[in-house]
Image: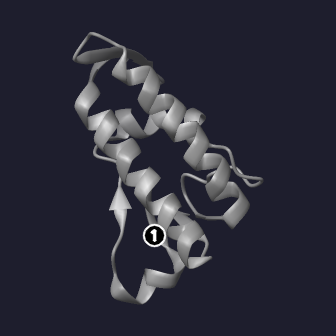
Amino acid sequence: MINWIVSELNEQGESWYFPSFEIQEYLLPIINVGVERIDEYGSTEYSIEDCRRLKYVIVFALETLAITQKSEIRYETIHDDLVPLNKQEIIDTLESLLDASKLSVKLQSELIFMGD
């Protein structure tokens, strides 16, 4: 699973993460807006400019989810065919990513994604 931290806050140990592999798999193509693609097994650093792009993409995704009436989103995973994803968990994850990207811009610090 991938988690993310704001480089400036790395020593404080504050980090965020995807709640499930399925939500991670669903969101990665949406949030992969950096010059460098997010490495699921390594470390990827998003620059301030990458974080600005990420903010706009997340806001658009949240607006799209807001008009979706269903509480579950069906997603075809790589391994398990169609699975239901909890819409609120997706929203919560996007909001965490948005907070982290805003904080990165504010602190002028990189956003680091770390896979395992």
Q: In the rendered view, tell whether residue 103 sits above or below residue 90.
A: below
Q: In the depicted view, which residue is nearer to us: 50 or 79?
A: 50
Amino acid on which disc 1 is placed:
Ile
Q: In the rendered view, tell whether residue 77 sits above or below residue 24.
A: above
Q: Residue furthest bottom?
A: 11
Q: In the depicted view, which residue is nearer to us: 103 or 23?
A: 103
Q: In the rendered view, tell whether residue 84 sits above or below residue 61.
A: above
Q: Quadrant of residue 84?
A: top left
Per the image, label 1 sits on a secondary structure element best described as strand
> Is residue 115 visible from the viewing direction of this image?
no
* Left or right of 23, for residue 7: right
Q: Residue furthest right?
A: 35
Where residue 49 sits in the image (x, y, percent)?
Answer: 72, 59
Where residue 71 sits in the image (x, y, percent)?
Answer: 22, 17
Name the residue at 33% across, 75% down: 14
Name the residue at 69% across, 56% down: 50
Where residue 20 sits in the image (x, y, percent)?
Answer: 30, 41
* Left or right of 13, for residue 4: right
> Is residue 27 visible from the viewing direction of this image?
yes
Name the residue at 29% across, 43% down: 92
Where residue 56 sits in the image (x, y, percent)?
Answer: 60, 42
* Left or right of 51, for residue 93: left
Q: In the depicted view, which residue is nearer to us: 85 or 83?
A: 85
Image label count: 1
Determine which residue is flagged by label 1: 5
Q: Residues within 10 Å of mark 1 (few under 14, many from 20)?
A: many
Q: Quadrant of residue 32?
A: top right
Q: Quadrant of residue 111?
A: bottom right
Q: In the depicted view, which residue is nearer to us: 77 or 107?
A: 107
